[in-house]
């Protein structure tokens, strides 16, 4: 709140009234002292704030990490947020694209760390740093008060990330999926090009009759349940669907699918991050299956789900 002469007079009106008993010179001297004290107090309460330097980030780009033992299926990503640290101090978390202020700490330059964030399990209110993507630490903030600099950070998987290829439907004829329930199998298709994402084929569930449904399960694969684990995939769909896991105690005993996320239709290809860490901690098994479930809505005569680049990511 700014200090005005009006506020000064109101605060010291009684003092000013009493000044009438003093001679003119003393009276004005006391008045000047009162004003100076009040003005000094206002400067202490409302100190001058430094002007920040601004940084603008539109999006992240991705590059391969040559030290990975197995490279991911795809370079696609869905980084929606950025966590900003300046000289190891958290500045904030911002939705992309973002322009954020940096108050320099008295030095001309400072280290900026930009951590990529993702939407977990398709929940817009569940956003966090993706544990497998490295932060960008190559940008140095040069003090430039009031000015904005645009920067495009780059990320990659950490070198100790482990990637297990579940299916991208490109190689051979075995799709690693089997029909668990329903009447429509997931099929590998390689045409037309308008249905493909990357590579020469994708998985497709096509439904054309009332009551059509599909629950498909991959072959079994082992996971270290003591570490963070995600399943990534790309999808395009005009029907809603669910994804989840089932755990197996041995070669014959396994659980029914446990669905972890429901996904709305999308007319464009999207990247999805399914966090299965909590599921693994609760449902121990010697191995696991990834499951997909969908059905034809009563309001539609046909429906298709396309999926590609399904991979397990752990440390």
Image (cartoon, rainbow, N blue to C red):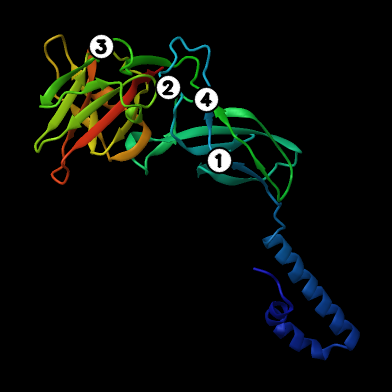
Q: Is residue 18 left or right of residue 239?
A: right
Do we see residue 276 in this rendering? no
The residue most toward the right is: 25
Q: Nearer the viewer, residue 85 or 43?
A: 85
Q: Earlier in the sequence, mark 4 or mark 3?
A: 4
The disc at residue 134 is 4
Q: Which residue is mark 2?
A: 74
Instruction: Indicate which label's residue lies in the foreground, 3 or 2.
Output: 3
Q: Residue at x 70, y 71 (%)?
A: 3
At which x and y percent is residue 94?
Answer: 51, 43
Q: Earlier in the sequence, mark 1 or mark 4?
A: 1
Q: Earlier in the sequence, mark 3 or mark 2?
A: 2
Instruction: Indicate which label's residue lies in the foreground, 2 or 4.
Output: 2
**What is the CA distance from the residue labelled 3 to the residue labelled 2?**
20 Å
Q: Earlier in the sequence, mark 3 or mark 1?
A: 1
Q: Name the quadrant containing residue 16.
A: bottom right
């Amino acid at each position: 709140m700014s200090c005005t002469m009006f506020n000064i007079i109101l605060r010291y009106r009684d003092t000013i009234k009493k000044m009438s008993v003093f001679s003119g010179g003393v009276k004005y001297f006391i008045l000047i002292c009162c004003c100076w004290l009040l003005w000094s107090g206002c400067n202490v309460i409302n100190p001058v704030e430094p002007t920040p330097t601004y940084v603008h980030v539109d999006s992240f780009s991705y590059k391969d990490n040559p030290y990975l033992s197995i490279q991911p299926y795809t370079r696609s990503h869905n980084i929606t947020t950025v966590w900003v640290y300046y000289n190891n101090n958290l500045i904030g978390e911002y939705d992309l694209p973002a322009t954020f202020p940096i108050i320099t700490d008295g030095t001309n330059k400072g280290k900026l760390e930009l951590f990529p964030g993702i939407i977990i399990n398709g929940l817009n209110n569940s956003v966090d740093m993706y544990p497998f993507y490295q932060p960008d630490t190559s940008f140095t903030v040069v003090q430039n008060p009031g000015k904005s600099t645009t920067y495009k950070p780059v990320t990659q998987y950490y070198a100790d990330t482990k990637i297990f290829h579940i299916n991208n439907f490109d190689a051979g004829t075995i799709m690693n999926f089997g029909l668990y329930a329903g009447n429509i199998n997931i099929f590998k298709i390689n045409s037309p090009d308008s249905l493909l994402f990357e590579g020469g084929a994708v998985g497709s569930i096509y439904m054309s009759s009332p009551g059509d449904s599909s629950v498909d399960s991959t072959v079994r694969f082992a996971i270290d349940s003591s570490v963070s684990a995600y399943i990534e995939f790309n999808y395009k769909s005009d029907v809603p669907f669910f994804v989840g896991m089932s755990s197996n105690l041995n070669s014959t005993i396994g659980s029914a699918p446990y669905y972890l996320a429901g996904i709305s239709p999308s007319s464009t290809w999207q990247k999805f991050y399914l966090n299965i860490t909590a599921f693994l901690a609760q449902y121990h098994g010697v191995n696991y299956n990834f499951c997909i479930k969908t059905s034809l809505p009563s309001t539609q005569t046909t429906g298709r789900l396309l999926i590609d680049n399904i991979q397990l990511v752990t440390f």
